[in-house]
Image (cartoon, rainbow, N blue to C red):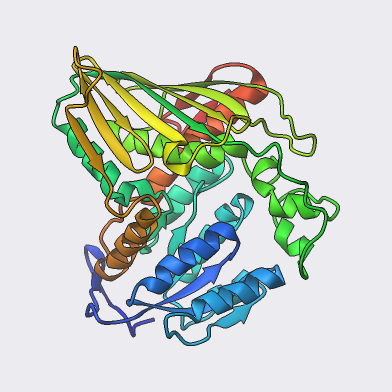
Amino acid sequence: MLNRRTFLASSAGLYVLNAAPSDTIRLGVIGVGGRGTFVVAAFGRNPAVQITAVCDVYEPNLERGVSISSAHGQRKPRAYHYYRDLLNDKDIDAVLIATPEHWHHRMVLDALASGKDIYVEKPLCRTPEQGAELVAAEQISNQIVQCGMQRRSYDLFIRAKETMDSGALGKVRMVRSWWLNNYLGAEKITKLDGKLDWDEWQGPAPRRPFDPDRFHNWRYYSDYAGGVVADQGAHVFDGIHLLMGSGPPVTVTASAGKPHRPEFDTPESVMVAARYPEDYIAVFTINYAAMKYRPQHDQLNQFDGDNARLDVGREDLSVYAQGAEDTPTHNYRSPRGFSYATDLHVANFLECVRSRKRPTAPIALGFQSALVVQMANLSLKHGRQIRWNAASQKVEV
């Protein structure tokens, strides 16, 4: 497709001549559930984007996605039931993949094969083997892939990274993070508001009888996702990797309580300890059986340096010097807040679609953050420490 960019082959490989900044990027959307709706709106607010097509196998989501995509004066997008039909649409330059986690691996591979640039929500994949395959596939393609780990584009975490890199904290050998919420009181979903293609939605997952709760609460069923520790932990560990400038861990050990929702088979209270070759330990605890906090207080990351401590929350950060722990020496609050991080991340992706530069959250980093929580779930399954062999790119159980 040469209307937006021109490709020239040379002895050094395939090169890209950038289009004019005014050129429109035509987007196809696959999956318009809760998170998908939020990200679609961020794309729709960007004047560089024309949302050309929307795909979902649940009719209410598809109708809502078409309606949202038609806002801001845009033309009504084409509606697709099957994502492969959308990928075959020659009028689409890039795709947003915001489906449940169990579809990410297959859809990213198919989107790469179709020549589309990709914005895919996290976690990138379900298993370490899938992640290694995706990294390899992306490396031999010419596509831009941005994983939806928006902290890497967020002004708060960029400021926190500057603080870390300044050396003000001294040596950081431990990072402590937590995330608190509560889903135990939510009602089980027993009916849907419209038609769902259950077989297509299950896709590569094991075949199960139709269950509305599995559809709505897929994050907490191991057939489709890694539970809350994977869903939220991928974000948290990616933020830690960003600030610490580190690669994947050497070992991961996890412990968890039992699930207290009888229909879910993943625990809501989990502790993860990851050891890194850069000589630090990251400890993450998540508890979705806690009291509910206001969003600005539901999570915290503490970087324990030997000179000072950096606290990074959802929308602000503080630095506390040794001997003066009561009063921060430095504060910063994001002027637009956490929700705007997605707009910034989308803008970075669109810029890279034009320039062909590396995005802030490329596929290798998406795999790295998913790997930690996958190792955590393997540790829970096998009851022991899990090791990552960087040379073989394999998990050792």
Instruction: Kindly give the residue lying farthest to the top in the view shown.
Output: 323
Where is the N terminus found, in terms of image quarters?
A: bottom left
Between 165 and 113, the residue placed more toward the observer is: 165
Residue 83: quadrant of the picture: bottom right
Left or right: residue 7 versus residue 292 is left
Against 68, residue 134 (above or below) is: above
- Residue at (33% x, 22% y) in the render: 277
Instruction: Kindly give the residue lying farthest to the right in the view shown.
Output: 209
Between 365 and 115, the residue placed more toward the observer is: 365
Against 239, residue 206 (above or below) is: below
Tell me where residue 142 appears, x and y as whole percent. 36, 64
Tell me where residue 255 appears, x and y as whole percent. 59, 19
- Residue at (24% x, 44% y) in the render: 158
Where is the C terminus found, in terms of image quarters?
A: top right
Left or right: residue 354 versus residue 63 is left
Tell me where residue 165 appears, x and y as whole percent. 17, 33
- Residue at (64% x, 73% y) in the render: 62
Left or right: residue 347 versus residue 213 is left
Left or right: residue 208 versus residue 182 is right
